[in-house]
Amino acid sequence: MAERIVSGRGQIYNSQLKAHIADVTFSDYATGDPWEAGNIASSAGGHTNATVQDATQLRTRFTGDLLVTINPKFGDFTTRLILGQQTRQEYMRTTYDYAGALVVPGTYNISNRLGNPTVAEYSSQNRLLGAFGDLTVGYRDFAFIHATGRNDWTSLLSPSNRSFFYPSVDASVIITEAIPSLKNSSVISYAKLRGGISKVGQVNVAPYQLQNVFNPGTGFPFGGQAGFEQSNQQNDPNLKPEFTTSKEVGLEIGLFDRFNLEAVYYNTVTTNQTVPIDVSRATGYSSALVNTGTMKNHGIELDLRTIRPLVSTGAFTWDLNANFTYLESLVTDVYQDLARINIPYGTDPYRPTLTGGASNVFAAKGFAYPALYVSDIQRVQSTDATAANYDPTGQFAGRPIVDATGYPTLDPTLRYAGTTQPKYRFGLTNTFKFKGITLSAVIEYRGGAVIYNALGNALEFTGAGIRSIYAGRQNFVFPNSVVVTGKNTDGSNQYANNTNVTTKDGNLVFWTNSGYHNAGYSYVTSADFWKLREVVLSYNIPTKIVGYTRFIKSLNIALTGRNLIMLRPKTNVFTDPEFSGGTNANDTSNAVGTTTEYQTPPTRFYGFRLSFGF
């Protein structure tokens, strides 16, 4: 028997942005900056011009698929062969304009401007062709071998590198079918063992990133003078695909004809990743796009669900589904002798030619990915006698050091603060039914990660952060701090508990310009949380009621809610740890684990749903 399927799909995404900043004249008091806070009013000279910007983005994707399936049978053997071809073509066009001064206040139109506007236009297209095969061979419906192979050709890479192949093979045995004595077991109702190895290729390169090109420079054309500039990133015409090799073994078992448990162990190795690295500015560039790095991941996945209700009493039933995952990652190699490379923020989708800024997230050799590196205040250390702040006794190791002003000072060396990828994930779904009423609740836990709340730095600078009132905005002794009291014979410092050296103030300077405020580690907290992720309460209208309509066969009414309750550590007074991103609200980069004021706040959703059956 043979079957042929031809399909085509098209997607269109269109977005528009218009934003403005009003003209502002500050008071003489604010401009004078009597508190020496270095505020916006003083730095702007008492006045800021109104601005306006417009942006559009159009993206289209067309996907065409051809599938041919044949499934002949040979005695005890069953086979299924799928041969396919896929074509995918993408197109994107963006426009952008900006005016930094307006003629008529309050009229936010790009034509109502002083001077030359900043304008940009960008368009790109790329195409991918793929051919693949998928073969499954079964023996007596209990032993199966499955193999796949796919070759892609992409326009994103050079002709010598654009073709790449990736295969996979896996096998499985249904033990309860292979061993007849298990079929009537009252304990094990089903058992399946499987394992496999696969290789997956992908291209993490934007269109036209193989060559260095010239783009119009910022502020040009200036009058009748044109100006062009190269990107700060050195591109490589020999970039290659990334590959991930995965090995997996799993067991699926049914217990007591009531539960189904699935356990999986996996190990993956990713190589040849496409990332930007910092280079000497003497080259004329600040970064280079290269293939580099090796990362390993391994972990377990557990899934437990009820086949029959956990509790069934009359018209009441209770079903349960629980899942748990553990992930351990390790970066084993980066680029040549580099210890770490930065993972930049994503570009503004409306201005894709501008590179994303540096983040606080790195791929660091010997550490989990992503690794968070931030600055910190000066602390006592007892591991390196040749470095600053050494304490040979080890008594004060890790404690902050304050100077005569009572303020801690900034340590310019970045320190590892942890990984921003949760190690542990747990989910629990409970479903209760009583006659036509159904109540479903999803609880989720994530743990083992940290987050840099850069948002907190901005809040405390403005005096809106709750921590800025902990000491009543009065002078205070910095918690757990020590002071230097003298020198040892070996030249190292002597330390003592700080009991009476208070901060110069507990208000403006401390929360806007102290070492503590400027240190990123001051805003690193646990990213753990428990969430009541979703609750749905629904009711099936009895068929004898909807039957009167003659054309409605079923009717369901439901109330829904998402992100209803969140529990997080007391140290995280800032925001939802899932609230993450970079320097623009549309950031989709891998630089996860940072919150800034550029994202919209986390949202709690309430909804109402009607479902009809005809």
Image (cartoon, helix red, strand yellow):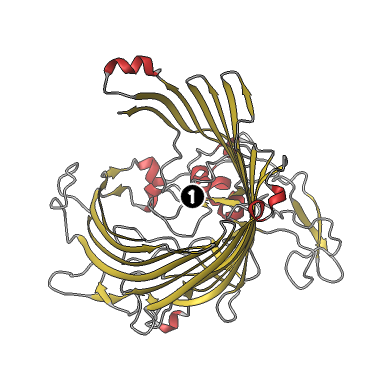
Please give the residue where the numbered disc 1 appears in the rendered image. Answer: 580
Tally the marks: 1
Q: Find residue 400 and report its horizontal and vertical position in percent.
A: 71, 54
- Measured along the vertical axis of the image, is residue 579 above or below residue 159? above
User: Which is more toward the observer, 220 or 576?
Assistant: 576
Q: Residue at x 87, y 70 (%)?
A: 489
Q: Position of residue 100 (x, y in %)?
A: 24, 55
Question: Looking at the image, which residue is at 18% across and 43% down?
Answer: 105
Q: Residues within 10 Å of mark 1 (few under 14, many from 20)?
A: many
**In-front residue for pair 429/242:** 429
Question: Where is residue 370 shown, x and y percent of the image?
Answer: 57, 61
Give the residue type that dot 1 points to.
Answer: Ser
Q: Closest to the observer: 2 or 89?
A: 2
* Along the viewing direction, whichever of 359 and 164 lies nearer the viewer: 164
In this rendering, would 160 be left or right of 449? left
What percent of the width, then of the height, locates residue 190? 64, 47
The kind of secondary structure element at disc 1 is loop
Classify residue 495 by image quadrant.
bottom right
Instruction: Relative to 373, say whether 163 is above or below.
Output: below
Vertical placement of residue 276 versus 594, above or below: below
* Residue 412 in sight from this viewpoint: no
